[in-house]
Image (cartoon, rainbow, N blue to C red):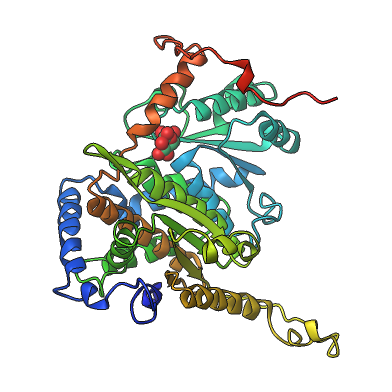
Amino acid sequence: MSLPILDLNNVLAPALAEGGLDPARLEVGGDLQRRFADAHEVFERRRAAGDLGFLDLPFDRETAGRVAEVAESFGQWFEDVVVLGIGGSGLGAVALREALLVPAWNERSDEVREYHPRLHVVDNPDPRTVHALFERIDPRRALFVVISKSGSTAETMALYLVARARVAAVVEAEQVRGHFLFVTDPERGALRTLAEAEGIPTLPVPANVGGRFSVLSSVGLLPAAVCGIDIDELLAGAAAMVEACRGTDLRANPAAALATVLWAADTELDLPIHVLMAYADRLRAFTLWFQQLWAESLGKVRGDGHVGPTPLPAVGATDQHAQVQLFMEGPRDKIVVFLAVDGSGVEVEVPDLHPDVETMAYLGGAGLGTLLDAERRATTEALRLRSRPSITLEVGSADARSFGALIMLFEIATVYAGGLYGVDPLDQPGVELGKRLTYALMGRHGYEAPDVPEVDERWRIGGTSG
Ligand SMILES: O=P(O)(O)OC[C@H]1O[C@H](O)[C@H](O)[C@@H](O)[C@@H]1O
């Protein structure tokens, strides 16, 4: 099978006239290769300690089989499947649905096929969204898949309680549990306890797989399989990428090359903003999945300092008319990773209706896909001409297999990057304080209300009119 190709030319000298990395540094014996070897050692140590459970997921046939069974039987009894989960427990399902099922993100992406149930993913406890969802679906014909590794996340617990009451209001008491499936830690957490007490079916998130690395566990596989995505293909692509990312030779290990170049871009070239720009609407949600992965894994305290790149999602050609001006002429603090997709499976020809109108004639007879790809190449070249570096990841057709490979590439690169930055890419201590303060504001037992400074009304500006 063909795996994504990582093209580094536009971050290296001489393609980049100014500020490019010397390619010799990436070769065997080069300093970046040696630097990566240390990160690789950390990675291997953690793998041996059993911390990197996500690497085993593509080979876990038992879980894939169980997921397929649940999706094909139980899952198909319903008209609507509603995933309730946030962060790593929601972003992956959306990325899979958008990439592999729905051609355009801004279509009504919850209306998919005739046979499979519609898949909705609700992450935010926004009352408008939740209200609108329950206006559209019939809880008697809906399955709620509650996904939470910890089994305690406030947003997800609140959404579960709402869904539970909505179901209980319209079905017999003994049928309520048949409308729920929990995806959670195999041993711990409130959802696990509840499932055991009430006989609610569950699927596990392995204990050594953290939320943002869990898309290839039941967390992403179940929603994907329910709506007809080929999870075997997805896992086969991911497995091939695990095999491809071994060893310390940057030219033979794409995740290593990606992580090392992005780390060097940040720490040496002063390019701390890492733009992921997908030239396909259907990869927009993937860029948001990447954003969580990169931000939560690498934005950390190290010693007495703070490190971490800022991931910035973008979509071409849309963002050529929004963000590219900034990328071209704004501060030199960005490196762009382009996702190039081979759209050959689907092409729409532009008809030659006005051969005399100069602004339209050249488009006649071309394909929209050809135009989109020309725009990507032109943007890459425009950046290069201004000595603004970029990387291109050619992801092929972005079918289930290559998408699985892409997911695994970024997951492995993230752990490598953790080693390069000298931080633990698997934790997220910085989100805890906000959670505790939310509990306090919501009156959770044992949490004290925060001591908020008095508000000075003079600095609350605006708000009245006339
Ligand atoms: O799966 P859960 O335990 O509900 O966690 C959901 C999310 O919330 C946390 O705040 C973490 O920052 C995320 O990494 C995680 O994915």
Image quarter for ligand 1 equals: top left
Question: Which quadrant of the rendered structure holds the N terminus?
Answer: bottom left
- Residue 2: give x, y in percent of width and height: 40, 77
Q: Measured from the top left, where is residue 146 in percent x and y?
A: 51, 34
| Quarter containing the C terminus | top right
Q: Residue furthest front?
A: 458
Residue drawn at (23%, 36%), measured in percent from left and top? 304
Tally the marks: 0
Question: Foreground residue, 182 or 88?
Answer: 88
Report the residue at 22% width, 48% height from top.
422
Residue 453 in percent (x, y) is at: 49, 14
Return the residue nearer the eye: 43 or 76.
43
Which corner quadrant of the image does residue 404 belong to? bottom left
Q: Residue at x 17, y 52 (%)?
A: 42
Residue 253: in sight, yes or no?
A: yes
Side of 347 where 229 appears, left or right: left
Q: Is residue 218 left or right of residue 84?
A: left
Asked if residue 148 shows in the view, the reply is: no
Against 252, residue 439 (above or below) is above
Q: Is residue 84 above or below residue 422?
A: above
* Residue 157 in the figure: left or right of residue 212: right
Could you say which is closer to the camera, residue 221 or residue 374? 374
Q: Quadrant of residue 263?
A: bottom left
User: Taking 32 as reference, is 132 above or below it?
Assistant: above
Determine whether 262 is above or below 304 in the image.
below
Q: Residue at x 68, y 21 (%)?
A: 169
Residue 36, percent from left and from top: 20, 62
